[in-house]
Image (cartoon, helix red, strand yellow):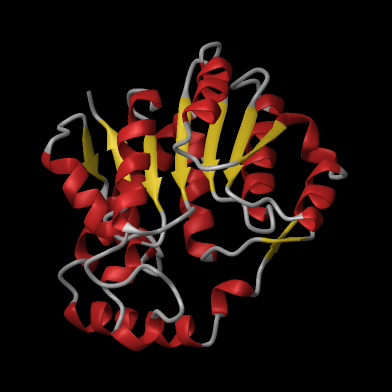
């Protein structure tokens, strides 16, 4: 496939993606399917390099496309859980290194409680050399100073927020981490879908409709014109946990 053929393929893809938003039958089916998948914990069924990765496979496809586009040498993720996501990010940075796109890619993972089994898994994994984990709140000043020290030597930074999903916490994360995002890169707020799900889909959590990452995103954007929602990504993958959560730095 030469460059002309590739550009033609991309153009055809873009036209298809644009048509999805106004396809009401498709969108209604998507909503029903997503809710049913969420009820049966579909997103808890997947692994990356042998480690649980509690994410939508479609979101991971979007994540790798973003990583290839941005070519970050630092990815920051708040929220670690089992560690599959930071391993996914680390492996993508290794691929960028192999392709000669970046040098010395690093991943930082922050979690209020990094469980002992997660520490063992990550520390003994082949990808561990490019991963740094900090235990504590993602908005704690002491941790932020450590992150800024690492970030100071990096060229392009990409960020994913996937820790405490309350409005207050996510808004604090957005305000804290947005200044680190490189021009053309992204800060992604995970689980904005909470605002769109029916009430019985979110149980035993401190977040809910009206108090979640999506409400934090909209509040953040009221006073920050440096970012805009990239609707093209969610239109493409459709089954995303992060509708309105892909924020691209435009200035």
Q: Residue furthest top?
A: 153
Look at the image and tell me whether residue 19 can be seen.
yes
Residue 185 in which image quadrant: top left
Residue 84 in which image quadrant: bottom right
Residue at x 64%, y 25% (from the top left corner)? 105
Tell which of 216 and 155 is nearer to you.
216
Tell which of 140 and 179 is nearer to you.
140
Look at the image and tell me whether residue 72 can be seen.
no
Percent coordinates x, y for residue 186 in the rendering: 37, 37
Residue at x 13%, y 36% (from the top left corner)? 223
**Count of labels shown?**
0
Q: Quadrant of the C terminus?
A: top left
Percent coordinates x, y for residue 80 in the rendering: 61, 51
Using residue 25 as the reference point, say whether residue 176 is left or right of it.
right
Q: Residue furthest left?
A: 222
Percent coordinates x, y for residue 12 in the rendering: 30, 53
Q: Is residue 149 above or below residue 98?
A: above
Tell which of 165 and 195 is nearer to you.
165
Q: Is residue 95 above or below residue 171?
A: above
Using residue 80 as the reference point, say whether residue 214 is left or right of it.
left
Using residue 92 as the reference point, say whether residue 49 is left or right of it.
right
Residue at x 69%, y 32% (from the top left corner)? 132
Q: Is residue 180 above or below residue 4?
A: above
Percent coordinates x, y for residue 189 in the rendering: 37, 50
Using residue 125 as the reference point, say whether residue 93 is left or right of it.
left
């Amino acid at each position: 496939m030469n460059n002309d053929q590739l550009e033609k393929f991309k153009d055809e893809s873009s036209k298809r993606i644009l048509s999805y938003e106004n396809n009401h039958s498709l969108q209604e089916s998507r909503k029903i399917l997503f809710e049913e998948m969420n009820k049966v914990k579909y997103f808890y069924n997947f692994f990356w390099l042998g480690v649980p990765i509690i994410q939508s496979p479609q979101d991971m496809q979007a994540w790798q496309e973003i990583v290839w586009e941005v070519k970050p040498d630092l990815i920051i993720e708040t929220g670690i859980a089992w560690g599959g996501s930071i391993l996914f990010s680390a492996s993508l940075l290794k691929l960028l290194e192999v392709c000669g796109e970046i040098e010395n890619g690093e991943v930082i993972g922050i979690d209020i409680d990094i469980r002992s089994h997660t520490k063992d898994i990550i520390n003994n994994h082949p990808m561990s050399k490019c991963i740094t984990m900090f235990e504590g709140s993602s908005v704690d000043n002491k941790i932020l100073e450590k992150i800024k020290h690492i970030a100071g030597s990096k060229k392009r930074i990409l960020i994913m927020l996937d820790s405490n999903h309350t409005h207050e916490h996510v808004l604090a994360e957005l305000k804290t981490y947005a200044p680190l995002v490189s021009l053309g890169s992204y800060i992604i707020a995970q689980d904005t879908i909470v605002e769109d799900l029916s009430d019985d889909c979110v149980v035993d959590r401190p977040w809910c409709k009206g108090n979640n990452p999506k409400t934090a995103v909209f509040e953040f954007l009221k006073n920050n014109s440096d970012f805009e929602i990239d609707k093209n990504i969610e239109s493409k993958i459709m089954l995303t946990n992060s509708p309105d959560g892909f924020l691209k730095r435009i200035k």
